Image (cartoon, grey):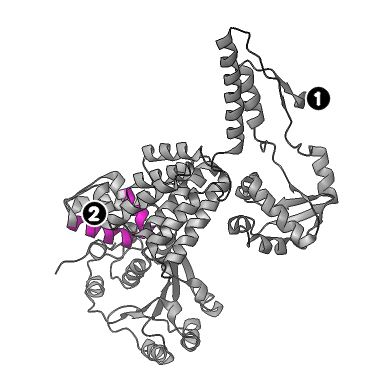
Amino acid sequence: MYKVLYRKYRPRYFADVIGQPQVTETLKNELASDRIAHAYLFTGSRGTGKTTCSKILSKAVNCLDPHNGDPCGECEICRGIDDGSIMDVVEIDAASNNGVDDIRLLREEADFTPANARYRVYIIDEVHMLSIGAFNALLKTLEEPPAHVVFILATTEVHKLPATILSRCQRFDFRRIAPQDIAARLEYVCEQENVSIDREAALMVAAVADGAMRDALSLLDQCMSKSHTITVDVVRTTAGLADRSFLFDLTEKIISNDAAGAVEIIDSLYRESKDMARLCTELCEHFRAIMLIKTVKIPQNILVMSESELQRLKEQSQKLTLDFTINTIEALQASAERMLRGANRRIEAEMTLVRLCSKGFGGTAIPQNIEERLKTLEHAVTQIKAGGSTGAKPSQPHISVSPPQKRPSVEEMQKLRSEAVPMAEWPDVIDELKKTSLTVATSFAGSTAYISGQYVLIDASNDFCFELLRESGFRKKMRDAIRLITGKEYKLGRYSYSEDDKPADDLARLVSDLKSAGIPVEDKNKN
């Protein structure tokens, strides 16, 4: 009988586990020094190695010839655990054995000494599914277990476990596996199976898997059934993904307010049987990538894509404001949620795209300062051409540029901080802000604020929230929320500035462009 890839290539040693060194190294050191705990708790998202490490650990504590904490894999105990003939290692599915009677039976069995192995090992998967009564029945055994018993609890939802259970276990958190690590493992599996796979295809499978190795191997299994040469197109077809060129095309339609063109693309994708909910999610991820490009210095450390796609994204990001990008993400997420609740997915996708293409949606697509600069320069060029066509000396418009809002000096900031008092209403402001912009409210979670004269000074370790406040739309939402809660108008300020935190130099670039065009500019900053 065919054995699926995620079972066939399940790691047999700690060294084979991908992307979890914080777990495997600690377990190996404990086993090598014979410091075996009576209860372990493995937490993390699906497909990250919890069950795999549980099986390896159950063999390692019972192995007759361990090697630096790893099981040998060759002794009769290791082979018996692998084929299920050793009855001292018991796997329990807490989803279907979650009652008090099930745990009482487990407690009675735990009193008996192992028949063949050194320890009786109980692996309880999805332990958060146990009932309250079952947890209470398990407490005493976890607190004072027999010397020959080891419990391994695994869960994807650790927040559902009682604190009394958590405090009795050694906890190990499994992280989502990095896309590069998943791609390397997929290439190794393909090499063993005599199948060729492109690097970009492996990275695409890793991106779809979202940090889960099991999901990646399952998708690879499907791709191998379709073709022995796995390319990006094979992965897209198998996973039902939209070609990324459609995502770039849809984004261009949104930027140019071309609702008709966007609906035509939706129609084309629908006729090709593309899932509208999946398309909505992918478009949301596309705008997330644009958001990261606009806020992160080295986005390629976070984004998984080819260099050509990254370059195209950078070009598109220059045509969008951060305000517009985040509003688009919020709209797409809301649309995806409505699709999951049973709405007609095609109609929902079309309505969302038409709304995004509307000129009145969520702010300005083209950054305002760039738009103003272009208009000014176009006007200047028109004047120069008009003067040249008549033979007269071209008239040079005289432009006055007003300085940006002045930031308080270092001395003024020190004075403001010295007079600042904590703002008790700040949590209420954040709650009010959630009604108009969940994104801004979330970014300011954990922050504090102070009132000093006409200023509300915000203190937060997250620089991203201050990037949001540079957008006029988000700044207005914050001021409105403060006014609704306090009944007063305040200016916004940062509680502390670093020396490198300098205002944007759009004004300086505009003055430079105008002077390069031969247009005299009166810079009021010099006054």
**Element type where label 2 sits in the image:** helix
Q: Identify which residue, 175 or 347, lies in the foreground.
A: 347
Residue 188 image position (x, y, % from top left)? 25, 51
Residue 506 image position (x, y, % from top left)? 63, 31
Label placed on residue 119: none
Type of the residue with mark 1: Asn
348 vs 40: above or below:
above
**Element type where label 1 sits in the image:** loop
Q: Identify which residue, 185 or 359, lies in the foreground.
A: 359
> Residue visible at 64% across and 48% down?
473
401 vs 500: above or below:
above
Crowding at label 1, few (<14), some or many (≥20) Cα neighbours within 10 Å? few
Label placed on residue 189: 2
Residue 192 image position (x, y, % from top left)? 19, 53
Cα distance between the residues tagged 2 and 1: 69 Å
Q: Is residue 468 magenta?
A: no
First to last magenta residue range: 203-225
Q: Is residue 281 left or right of residue 66?
A: right
Residue 173 visible in the picture? no
Label placed on residue 527: 1
Type of the residue with mark 2: Val
